[in-house]
């Protein structure tokens, strides 16, 4: 199976992070010293992706610039002998081939993916959502790739959520389960928690056949008048067969303020430079709160 392209939708305006996101795209907010988006790009590259297609909004050109050379900065770093930082800046432009297409109106995730149709072409492709960093020694997309290569069908990442949170996700129904694999029968976008078909939710990673684009082109608008990618997965599950994969790793919702803070704590505790002082600080604050 050929899988060399990944679509990352980054056109959202990040209103949950206003006023911070007024000028700085939330995808460039840092988890430690790396933007959230860079974690996702690095995962894609580690999973065999060669071309990243950014579905962007015209006002968010800082995202495109982040992966482009910046001669003035490179010159300054070289002049000051900061070669390790210079190497890091150079590496950004060499991670993959980057291409940008635009979603000029907020018409849903399905519409954002459809905007990438011409750039993707007639081949299997991945979709990675920029708010969902997943930490594991084996990248989540690489885990899913093995499933897609074995089953020769599409795959979505799924995780179990509480019933109360079902209305925030695309929830899957399935006919059978093989370890971490679910044979999907349908997908319901943001159902009433009391009517959810299961407690397995789609999160942040998709491997999709090229036929997805034809389905998206003919989908009627769903919730909020938007074209939902979950509705396309629902059609694929019924027509071609589709799998849910309960991934290994820790996932954070970096598009939510608390989730973003938790993600920063997680990655800081993994870093030898920050782990001990951060743990000392957290213990101190916990003691203060409990006294």
Image: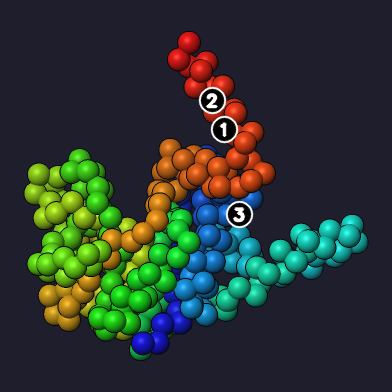
Image x and y of residue 270, in percent: 56, 47
Nearest to the observer: residue 117 or residue 262: 262
Q: What residue appears at the point 18 percent right and 51 percent down from the top-left corner?
A: 199
Circle 2 residue: 283
Helix, strand or loop at label 2? It is helix
Nearest to the observer: residue 107 or residue 66: 66
Q: CA distance from mark 1 to mark 2?
A: 6 Å
Query: Which label was assigned to residue 34?
Result: 3
> Crowding at label 2, few (<14), some or many (≥20) Cα neighbours within 10 Å?
few
Q: What residue appears at the point 60 percent right and 28 percent down from the top-left corner?
A: 280
Nearest to the observer: residue 57 or residue 29: 29
Circle 1 residue: 279
Q: Earlier in the sequence, mark 3 or mark 1?
A: 3
User: Is 156 drawn above or below residue 133 in the view shown?
Assistant: below
Helix, strand or loop at label 3? It is strand
Discs 2/3, front: 2
Residue 184 is left or right of residue 265, and the answer is left
Q: What residue appears at the point 54 percent right and 66 percent down from the top-left corner?
A: 42
Q: Are marks 3 and 1 in contact (CB under 8 Å)?
A: no
Q: Quadrant of residue 144?
A: bottom left
Residue 192 is left or right of residue 75, and the answer is left
Q: Are marks 1 and 2 in contact (CB under 8 Å)?
A: yes
Q: CA distance from mark 2 to mark 3?
A: 26 Å
User: Is 58 drawn above or below residue 98 in the view shown?
Assistant: above
> Crowding at label 1, few (<14), some or many (≥20) Cα neighbours within 10 Å?
some
Q: CA distance from mark 3 to mark 1?
A: 21 Å
Q: What residue appears at the point 31 percent right and 75 percent down from the top-left corner?
A: 147
């Amino acid at each position: 199976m050929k899988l060399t392209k990944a679509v990352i939708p980054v056109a959202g305006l990040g209103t949950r992070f206003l006023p911070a996101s007024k000028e700085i795209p939330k995808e460039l907010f840092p988890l430690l010293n790396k933007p959230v988006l860079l974690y996702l790009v690095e995962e894609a590259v580690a999973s065999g992706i060669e071309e990243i297609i950014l579905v962007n909004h015209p006002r968010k050109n800082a995202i495109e610039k982040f992966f482009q050379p910046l001669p003035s900065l490179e010159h300054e770093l070289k002049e000051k002998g900061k070669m390790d930082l210079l190497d890091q800046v150079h590496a950004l432009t060499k991670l993959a081939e980057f291409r940008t297409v635009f979603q000029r109106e907020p018409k849903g995730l399905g519409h954002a993916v459809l905007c990438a149709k011409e750039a993707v072409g007639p081949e299997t492709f991945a979709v990675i959502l920029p708010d969902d960093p997943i930490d594991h020694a084996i990248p989540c997309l690489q885990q899913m790739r093995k499933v897609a290569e074995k089953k020769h069908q599409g795959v979505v990442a799924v995780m179990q959520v509480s019933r109360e949170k079902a209305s925030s996700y695309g929830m899957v129904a399935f006919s059978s389960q093989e370890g971490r694999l679910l044979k999907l029968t349908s997908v319901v976008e943001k159902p009433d928690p009391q009517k959810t078909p299961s407690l397995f939710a789609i999160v942040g990673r998709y491997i999709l056949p090229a036929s997805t684009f034809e389905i998206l082109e003919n989908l009627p608008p769903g919730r909020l008048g938007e074209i939902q990618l979950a509705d396309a997965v629902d059609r694929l599950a019924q027509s071609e067969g589709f799998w849910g994969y309960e991934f290994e790793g820790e996932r954070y919702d970096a598009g939510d303020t608390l989730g973003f803070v938790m993600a920063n704590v997680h990655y800081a505790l993994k870093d030898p430079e920050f782990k001990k002082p951060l743990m000392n600080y957290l213990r101190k604050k916990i003691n203060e709160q409990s006294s």
